[in-house]
Amino acid sequence: MKIAVVGSYGVGLTMRVPRMPGAGETLLGGEFSDGPGGKGSNQAIGAARLGADVSLLTAIGADAFGRSGQELWATERVDARKAIVVDGAATMVGFIVVEPNGENRIVIAAGALDHLDEVAVETFRSEIAAADVVVVSMEIPLVAVLAALRIGREEGTLTLLNPAPAQPLLDDAWNLIDIVTPNQTEAPILLGVTGTDEDLAQALRDRTSGSVVLTRGSAGAIVVDDSGTQIVAARAVEKVIDTTGAGDAFTAALAVALAEGRPLTAAVEFAASAGAHAVTISGVIPSLPTRDQLETDDLFITSASLGAADAFGASNDL
């Protein structure tokens, strides 16, 4: 079971403040934390923890943050030997300021990720060709997204696009997508239209000719494929602690289940369990479940509840 991931890595620098400072003001009293993030890295680690053989293509700077990423991947058994190290560019960083009520403001400096282009993705062709699934997210340049999807199609590898953060796709990308997994916010941005969740899911199906998994928090997911349209219920949990990594846990588990040969609806159910597990633990990397944790967890029930509100696709992962 092999999965190739083309996506981002970065470090989130978070400051918790009593209030937002005004222009020109210096404010005391903030609590600081930092930690690894980036959708591609998170998804690669999530898939590895579930037992997959994972290769990751990303771009990092020749700096301390980049080296910490390499150490993390080695610890998590993610093969990132093809990661691009860019001299003179910093590893992606997100600056996050959080108020007591949870409201936040985020500024991202993409840095080395801007150098992830079609030439870099071509160096990853053999990993994509050997994989059962290639997972692509959109924190990287669109030319890299297109190249990864194109190589996946050329090599006969299932292509899974997690369109986050959402932006209009290049026209050539649509017919290269086997499965697309937007949430309620991302779907209308991808399509450039508004509508009901059901209409948006069908419109995505028509646009790609592939399968669609539209995630909707506590309302579950709409799955549209060759067999028609189905609703997969969200998994309820006793208490939601942190929703930050749920979307990446979901995507990783979906890729693993598909690589195992599960039908799409069954794969989405497995992914829902991973997303539900993630919201019960603080922090992105700590929240990504192992196979044993999913098989032994007794947190989950099959009906949706308010506690399941972010078990599907919620992710603000820096």
Image (cartoon, grey):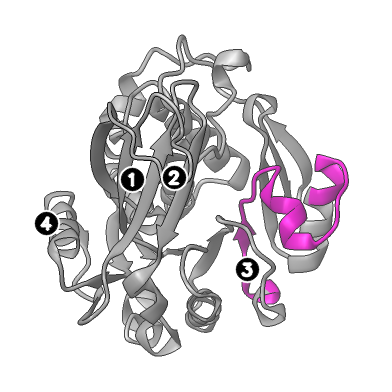
Q: Residue at x 57, y 34 (%)?
A: 312
Q: CA distance from mark 3 to mark 4?
A: 32 Å
Give residue 151's position: percent from left, percent from top. Answer: 48, 82
Q: CA distance from mark 4 to mark 1?
A: 16 Å
Point out which mark residue 177 bears: 3
| Three-letter amino acid code of the residue under disc 4 | Glu
Q: Categorize mark 2 by other alpha carbons within 10 Å: few (<14), some (14-19), many (20+).
A: many
**Circle nearer the N terminus (2, 4):** 4
The quadrant in which residue 73 appears is bottom left
Nearer the viewer's eye, disc 2 or disc 1? Answer: 2
Give residue 52's position: percent from left, percent from top. Answer: 30, 52
Residue extending farthest to the front is 24
| Three-letter amino acid code of the residue under disc 3 | Ile
Residue labelled with disc 2: 248
| SS under mark 3 | loop
Give residue 72's position: percent from left, percent from top. Answer: 16, 52
